[in-house]
């Protein structure tokens, strides 16, 4: 209980799911044939889901299309709240809402110190909101989810908790939301926009754009030229970053969060988020890469999993 109060619920949440991901991912990658079906079926989902039988797990599986819920709630509940708060506090120089302080004290600890400038908090928040709305568009209007693809209830609950926890961590060490802070630190000055901030923005938008392009390529594999869904099968995607990587949309996710890390590196809580993104995306990339290799004899041998031309 002392650790929970000191670190905060959000840090404990990300530390826990990262530990579980690394532990189970390592076991799946190294000794899957020797693991109980319930563990394998709980961990694997979507196209690389386990074909094993477990009534306990099957009873708590949900359609993979429920991924839409993560971005629906984030786009129209959490993102507007985040934008409202940064405008009211940093642009209009208002005070932080008592309810927001209370939530931050519970979720991120009461002994929080301001470590990030208001400018970087604003940039990171706007970029994350931009990502949320684009992923909302992707999942609702671009992607075609297989009717047979499922996710575990645990995956769903983690996904629903993810974005509110990320927004809370960004604000947890922001000036005015944490103490102590200087007046200069809490003001947004565009002339403070330096090389690091510009590099982070450019890197994020570069990956953001290519994630959209590759998501569209995946969606079009199941559509005809008119945009109608005509297939539920899996095919080998071609074009853009798919020429070099098997899951470029996931690699783009890592790059985007690396860009955000350039902005939020001094925020201790952010490293818990970044660790989760790395562990989750790398494992997803590896499982997807191996799945493609095992299901398509004509899968390009030059196409890599994580790093173009190398691995």
Image (cartoon, rainbow, N blue to C red):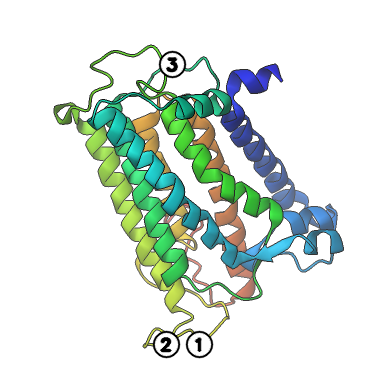
Task: Estimate the x, y position of residue 142 in percent, counting from the top left.
Answer: 42, 71
Q: Distance between the Cα atoms at labels 2 and 1?
A: 6 Å
Secondary element type, mark 2: loop
Front label number (2 vs 3): 3
Secondary element type, mark 3: loop
Q: Name the residue under label 3.
A: 113
Q: Quadrant of residue 16?
A: top right
Q: Quadrant of residue 65?
A: bottom right
Q: Which of marks 2 and 1 is nearer the N terminus?
A: 2
Q: Mark 1 points at which residue?
A: 230
Residue at 57% across, 32% down = 10
Residue at 39% across, 39% down = 82
Residue at 27% across, 19% down = 185
Q: Distance between the Cα atoms at labels 2 and 3?
A: 54 Å
Q: Are marks 2 and 1 in contact (CB under 8 Å)?
A: yes
Task: Estimate the x, y position of residue 249 in percent, counting from the top left.
Answer: 44, 59
Q: Which of marks 3 and 1 is nearer the N terminus?
A: 3
Q: In this view, does 171 lie to the left or right of 41?
A: left
Is residue 253 or residue 79 the one in the foreground?
79
Tell me if residue 109 comes above or below residue 152 in the rendering: above
Q: Residues within 10 Å of mark 1 (few under 14, many from 20)?
A: few
Q: Quadrant of residue 262?
A: top left
Q: In this view, does 33 lie to the left or right of 159?
A: right
Task: Estimate the x, y position of residue 103 in percent, counting from the top left.
Answer: 52, 29
Secondary element type, mark 1: loop
Is residue 21 or residue 180 the one in the foreground?
180
Tell me if residue 40 comes above or below residue 106 in the rendering: below
Q: Name the residue under label 2.
A: 224
Q: Distance between the Cα atoms at labels 3 and 1?
A: 54 Å
Q: Is residue 195 left or right of residue 304?
A: left
């Amino acid at each position: 209980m002392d650790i929970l109060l000191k670190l905060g619920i959000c840090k404990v949440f990300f530390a826990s799911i990262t530990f579980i991901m690394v532990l189970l991912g390592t076991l799946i990658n190294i000794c899957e044939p020797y693991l109980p079906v319930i563990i394998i079926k709980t961990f694997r989902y979507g196209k690389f889901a386990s074909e094993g039988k477990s009534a306990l797990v099957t009873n708590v599986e949900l359609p993979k299309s429920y991924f839409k819920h993560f971005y629906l709630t984030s786009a129209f509940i959490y993102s507007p709240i985040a934008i409202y708060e940064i405008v009211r506090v940093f642009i209009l120089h208002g005070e932080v809402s008592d309810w927001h302080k209370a939530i931050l004290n519970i979720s991120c600890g009461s002994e929080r110190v301001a470590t990030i400038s208001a400018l970087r908090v604003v940039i990171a928040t706007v970029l994350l909101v931009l990502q949320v709305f684009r992923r909302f568009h992707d999942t609702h209007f671009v992607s075609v989810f297989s009717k047979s693809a499922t996710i575990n209830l645990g995956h769903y609950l983690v996904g629903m908790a993810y974005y509110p926890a990320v927004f809370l961590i960004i604000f947890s060490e922001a000036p005015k939301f944490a103490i102590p802070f200087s007046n200069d630190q809490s003001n947004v000055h565009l002339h403070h926009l330096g090389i690091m901030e510009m590099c982070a923005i450019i890197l994020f938008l570069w990956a953001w754009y290519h994630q959209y392009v590759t998501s569209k390529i995946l969606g079009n594999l199941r559509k005809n030229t008119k945009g109608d869904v005509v297939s539920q099968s899996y095919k080998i995607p071609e074009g853009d970053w798919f020429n070099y990587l098997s899951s470029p949309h996931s690699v783009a996710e890592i790059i985007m969060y690396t860009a955000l890390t350039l902005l939020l590196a001094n925020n201790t809580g952010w490293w818990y988020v970044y660790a989760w993104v790395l562990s989750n995306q790398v494992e997803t990339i590896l499982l997807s890469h191996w799945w493609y290799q095992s299901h398509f004899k004509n899968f390009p041998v030059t196409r890599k999993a994580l790093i173009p031309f190398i691995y």
